[in-house]
Image (cartoon, rainbow, N blue to C red):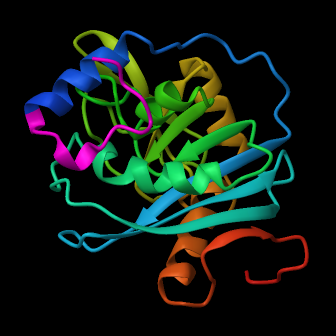
Amino acid sequence: MVVTPELNYDQLTLGEATLIQQQLRGHLRLEPFQKEIKTIAGADISLTLYSETVFAGLVILSYPELQPIACSLVQSSTIFPYVPGYLAFREIPAILKAYEQIPVKPDLIMFDGNGILHARRMGIASHFGVVTGAVTMGCAKKKLAGQYAEPGASKGEYANVTDKGEVIGYAVRTKENVKPVFISPGHQMSLEDSLAIALKCTGKHRLPEPTRYAHEYVNKFRTGEIKAGYHDLSSWKLF
């Protein structure tokens, strides 16, 4: 079975979805990222737990300044069920449409979700990276797999997340005395790269700036404050 971005995920059973994750894992690349980063995108979706409507977006930021320069927003739909560990099958088709609208692709995409910090090492960031060839990483609000010791309370402290003796990501304290976020590489970068980039993207908030902006813009899209499509944000003053 050849996996392509055009695959209709809505028609899959969980068994077929598991097989796809296992196949994609064979194409995963976790080597050091050698290129210069000039742009980084945050990717997020907004949907009600059991709704079929998906609001998806990518917000592109300059790097290392982390200022929004463009966004791509799409409304789509899905009937794939809500099952932890398989959320990529609900979210990727919509995010892929948003990605295809971007004329100049970002150097790197940070997802509100996991990379290899996943029982089958195939969270949404890894899944999207393999099917598109994009460089990706995950920044999740909840741990999907593995174990870790609580990192120190200060901003920038972190602890390894391990599963079956393998380091699969990091619990990172991005703001003093708040819950950590969970960082992992998605595709075409190393574990160390994902941690370093996440720390460079941390501002005053719990979420790193790329996924924080993606969350804000997608929610404004959902409430009708921003229209679907690709937008140059150089003259916008939303936040």
> Residue at coordinates 60% horizontally, 19% vertically from top-left?
188
Q: Is residue 176 visible?
A: no
Q: Residue at x 27, y 9 (%)?
A: 165
Q: Where is residue 199 drawn, in percent x and y? A: 66, 40
On screen, residue 155 versus residue 90, left or right, reads right
Of 193 and 97, nearer the camera is 97
The magenta segment is 1-14
How far across and how far down the image is residue 116, in percent?
A: 39, 26
For residue 178, what is the image quadrant?
Answer: bottom left
Q: Is residue 222 above or below residue 82?
A: below
In the displayed structure image, the side of residue 168 where residue 104 appears, left or right: right
The N terminus sits in image quarter:
top left
Q: Look at 60% across and 75% down and name the residue there.
A: 228
Q: Residue at x 54, y 72 (%)?
A: 218
Decide which of 215, 72 is in the foreground and name it.
72
Q: Quadrant of the C terminus?
A: bottom right
Q: Is residue 34 magenta?
A: no
Query: Residue 12 colored magenta?
Result: yes
Residues 40 and 145: in front is 40
Examine the image and state in which quarter residue 7 appears: top left
Q: Position of residue 127 (x, y in %)?
A: 41, 32
Our reading of the magenta stretch's main secondary structure is loop
Q: Position of residue 17 (x, y in %)?
A: 19, 33
> Looking at the image, how many numbered discs can be counted on the residues?
0
Q: Is residue 40 visible?
A: yes
In the rendered view, would you say 212 is above or below 164? below
